[in-house]
Image (cartoon, helix red, strand yellow):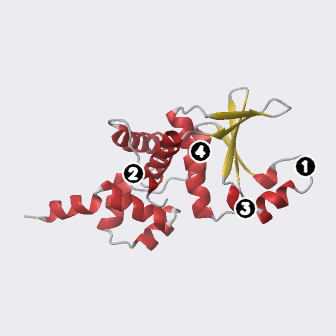
Amino acid sequence: MKGRSSRALFRRGFKTWCETVATQKRRALKVPLNAPLDPRLLAQEMRVAVRYIHEIPSLAPGTLEQLTVHDPDVWSAVTLCHNGRYLIVLNSAHPKTREANTLMHELAHLIIGHKPARLDITNDGLMILSSYDKQHEEEATWLAAALLLPRDALLHIRRRGLTDQQAARVYGCSVQLVTFRIQTTGVDLQLRRARKP
């Protein structure tokens, strides 16, 4: 996370819209508002297929080893589109907490309706949505964070007295994401004001 989204200039009402979307998605999936949301469940609801890179057939020799052993940090996911259907391919070398945020980030681009700044087409006609502009990346980062840790979840975390580390384990995300969301949503301030007589 590295706090990069906190410096982004979002269009008016965007952050509120993200919280609304997070609530709507949980309700549609019958997931309690303060409960963890599995990104794969959301992908299924959106009819987006999700695979690991090692599940992709017919990769060129050495490709899997290059992408998961020699250069695992140069990519997290890629979204492919063919005949209006989407496939997100994840880097199987990454930890589950990073994977959850990565998948939610890719889904966030699709929810917002972002069009990639760069679009590659393979020889067999697959479109690779490979690059978004900085503003789109910031928006997807913010929405992904709200989907994984909506305001109701943050209030639940604080009311239960969970540490950021405990909350990260419960919600299947990184400690950095929990800290980022707590700091940027003003949840602690809201609870302090609520306790005042």
The residue carrying mark 3 is: 72
State if disc 4 and disc 1 touch (CB < 8 Å).
no
Q: Position of residue 129 (x, y in %)?
A: 67, 37
Residue 178 appears in the figure: yes
Q: Residues within 10 Å of mark 2 (few under 14, many from 20)?
A: few
Occupied quadrant, residue 155: bottom left
Q: Which mark is residue 106?
A: 4
Q: Position of residue 188 (x, y in %)?
A: 26, 63
- Dot placed on the residue nearer the N-terminal end, 4 or 3: 3
- Dot placed on the residue nearer the N-terminal end, 1 or 3: 1
Q: CA distance from mark 1 to mark 3?
A: 17 Å
Image quadrant in which the C terminus is located:
bottom left
Occupied quadrant, residue 154: bottom left
Q: CA distance from mark 4 to mark 3?
A: 18 Å
- Dot placed on the residue nearer the N-terminal end, 2 or 3: 2
- Where disc 3 sits, the SS reads helix
State if disc 3 and disc 1 touch (CB < 8 Å).
no
- Dot placed on the residue nearer the N-terminal end, 2 or 4: 2
Residue projecting furthest to the top: 83
* Amino acid residing under circle 4: Glu
Occupied quadrant, residue 43: top right
The residue carrying mark 2 is: 7
Q: Position of residue 127 (x, y in %)?
A: 73, 33
The residue carrying mark 1 is: 60
- Where disc 1 sits, the SS reads loop
* Amino acid residing under circle 1: Ala
Q: CA distance from mark 2 to mark 4?
A: 21 Å
- Where disc 4 sits, the SS reads helix
